[in-house]
Image (cartoon, helix red, strand yellow):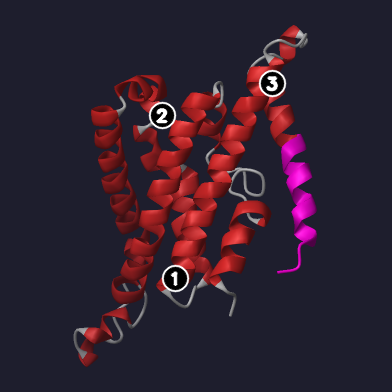
Amino acid sequence: MESALNIFIKSIFIDNMVFAYFFGMCSYIAVSKSVKTAMGLGIAVVFVLTVTVPLNYLINEYILKEGALSWISPSMADVDLSFLTFILFIAVIASFVQLVEMVIEKFAPALYNQLGIFLPLIAVNCAILGGSLFMQERAYVNIGEATAFGFGSGIGWWLAIVMMAAIREKISYSDIPKPLKGVGITFIITGLMGIAFMTFLGIQL
């Protein structure tokens, strides 16, 4: 059994959602034009992943998987509701994204306007759903491990988008060939950063 610290470190550097799996690329590319907006969206993603992954862990353990309903009645031990996984996971994610959107609109309207459509789109961000599905696939043994994975995955995504935003702010002053400006050079840099993050595969945890 892995420790929560190992899971946390691995989810940031080795199993990074962007550089290892290229999840959440739509908002990663679109919002990484400035560090300020990238920071805001990254923090929102960290919060949503940290809350939804352990909550979906509880839903999976006590409602969805085969035998999960045995706590209600022994006669329900054979019930398997795993076919509802996507529906329930997305419902939980959408609820918390709506909460985050309302809070940001209330307390940081400028950031809310800068993020635009990409804030509600966190609900369909494959990195968010991927966090819950990876949690389910890896069968973490307790909610502490699931929370560590969700928090680490969020930090990894936040780190990726802030790093990219910082680089894009710097290269805006560089003489980049016209065909590569914008998305083109962003994809090239992302690939190079993904290769760089592969060096963390050698970490022994």
114 on left or right of 76? right
Between the C-alphas of marks 2 and 1, the distance is: 30 Å
Kind of residue at disc 2? Phe
The residue tagged 3 is 184
Figure check: 85 above or below 117 = below
Contact, mark 2 vs mark 1 (Cβ under 8 Å): no
Q: Is residue 100 magenta?
A: no
Residue 190 visible in the shown view: yes
The residue positioned 63% from the left and 19% from the top of the image is 169
Label 1 amino acid? Answer: Gly
Where residue 43 sits in the image (x, y, percent)?
Answer: 44, 40
Secondary structure found at label 3? helix
Magenta segment, which residues?
Answer: 192-205
- The residue to which callout 2 is attached is 118
In the rendered view, does 33 fall on the left or right side of 122?
right
**Location of mark 1 (residue):** 144
Identify the image quadrant of the N terminus.
bottom right
Separation of residues labelled 3 and 2 (CA atoms): 20 Å
Going by the numbered disc 3, the residue's amino acid type is Gly
